[in-house]
Amino acid sequence: MDRAAKEKVVSDLTKKFDESNFFILTHNNGLSVHEITSLRNQLREAGSTFKLLKIA
């Protein structure tokens, strides 16, 4: 990911943080694809979102 793309991600996240009542940061080691998909679906049904970021 080039610098411009990283700046866009940071800008988008900053906007989401500013618009949110609260947010939760987690570490997802050990979750299977099925578990992450299930979590995403449950959050979507509740009107929430799930964003996975890989920080390298």
Image (cartoon, rainbow, N blue to C red):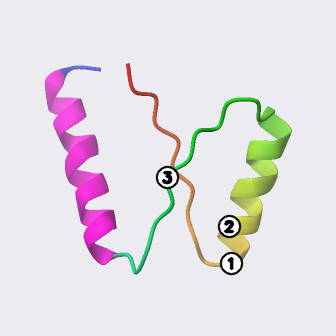
Q: Is residue 55 left or right of residue 26?
A: left
**Which residue occupies the foreground of this view, 6 or 23?**
23
Q: Are marks 1 and 2 in contact (CB under 8 Å)?
A: yes
On the image, the x and y values in percent for residue 37 come to: 76, 47
Mark 2, secondary structure of its residue: helix
**Which residue has dot 1 on it?**
46
Give the residue at mark 3. Answer: 25
Q: Amino acid at mark 3?
A: Leu
Q: Is residue 4 above or below residue 20?
A: above
* Left-right relation of 1 to 35: left
Marks 3/2 in contact by CB < 8 Å: the verdict is: no
| Rendered residue at 31%/54% (across/down) | 13
For the residue carrying disc 1, how many other residues have a C-alpha within 10 Å: few (<14), some (14-19), or many (20+)?
A: few
Residue topped by disc 2: 43
The residue segment tinted magenta is 3-19
- Alpha carbon distance from label 1 to label 3: 18 Å
Compare residues 44 and 26 and report the one nearer the observer: 26
Q: Which label's residue is closer to the chain start, 3 or 2?
A: 3
Quadrant assignment, res 10: top left
Query: What secondary structure characterizes most of the magenta part?
Result: helix
Name the kind of residue labelled 1 in the image.
Ala
Q: Looking at the image, which residue is at 64% across and 37% down?
A: 28
